[in-house]
Amino acid sequence: MKPTSKKIIKSVIDDLFVTIPSGKIDMRDDRTKEFWSVDIDSFALGKFLLTQDIYKAIMDDNPSAFIGERLPVENVSWIDAVHFCNKLSDILGKEKCYSVNLETQEVVLNAKANGYRLPTEAEWQYACQAGTKNIRYGDLNQIAWYKENANNQTREVGQKTPNNWGLYDMLGNVWEWCSDIYDETVYGSYRVFRGGGWCDQERSVMATTRRRSHPFSFKIDDLGFRIATNSKK
């Protein structure tokens, strides 16, 4: 994608989204053995992982280790993903979802803003499971790129079978940053990422697997993101 105008960018971004219906999701943390439920309002989520062509068009940069326009962008920190969301919102005249203070490393989410953001962890799992309680939405080789079939690299988005809501690569290919802090009392500002990546064993590539790391300094070649919004328009 080589967008040259706001109109082209808007067309590409609008076509990216799938509307996710409202509902409820049951969550768990295998580390703490905690269980909780979250009500989900309808929102829109990118049908694909954020690709390098779109990231470069907005940020004029491509930090990825594996280069290809339709490969997922990776080697991005959580704050890189936040900056992308805010810049895209600004370009398209929408309200930014994040207020960022780089000096204090404080980031505040305005969940009601009409701009672009990362999904919450609950939204991500709810969208991944697509109305079920299953740890996967199909046979792993059919739905995901992981250690056994990825040939030691990321793969172009959209090649595997999507889930029932039309979302691709929710499992495998690259992990996905979410908006949420993982556990502030234990891990401070660490943010959640979900979904498993190209170098993970089968046991890690599940809708319920939770990981976390530092939002400003951690970036790796199997971690990217997809974008969400409260409204497509």
Image (tube, rainbow, N blue to C red):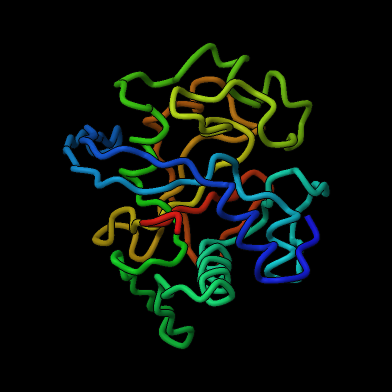
- Residue at 45% across / 26% down in the picture? 206
| Residue that sits furthest to the top in the current view | 139
Above or below for 135 versus 208: above
- Residue at 24% across / 44% down in the picture? 40
Above or below for 42 versus 168: below
Would you say 4 lies left or right of 178 here? Answer: right
- Residue 218 lies in quadrant: bottom right
Q: Which quadrant is the C terminus positioned in?
A: bottom left
Q: Which quadrant is the N terminus positioned in?
A: bottom right
- Residue at 42% across / 32% down in the picture? 128
- Residue 33 lies in quadrant: top left
Q: Position of residue 83 (x, y in %)?
A: 55, 71
Q: Nearer the viewer, residue 52 or 196?
A: 52
Q: Position of residue 81 (x, y in %)?
A: 55, 62
Q: Nearer the viewer, residue 145 or 152?
A: 145
- Residue 99 lies in quadrant: bottom left
Q: Position of residue 229 (x, y in %)?
A: 42, 56
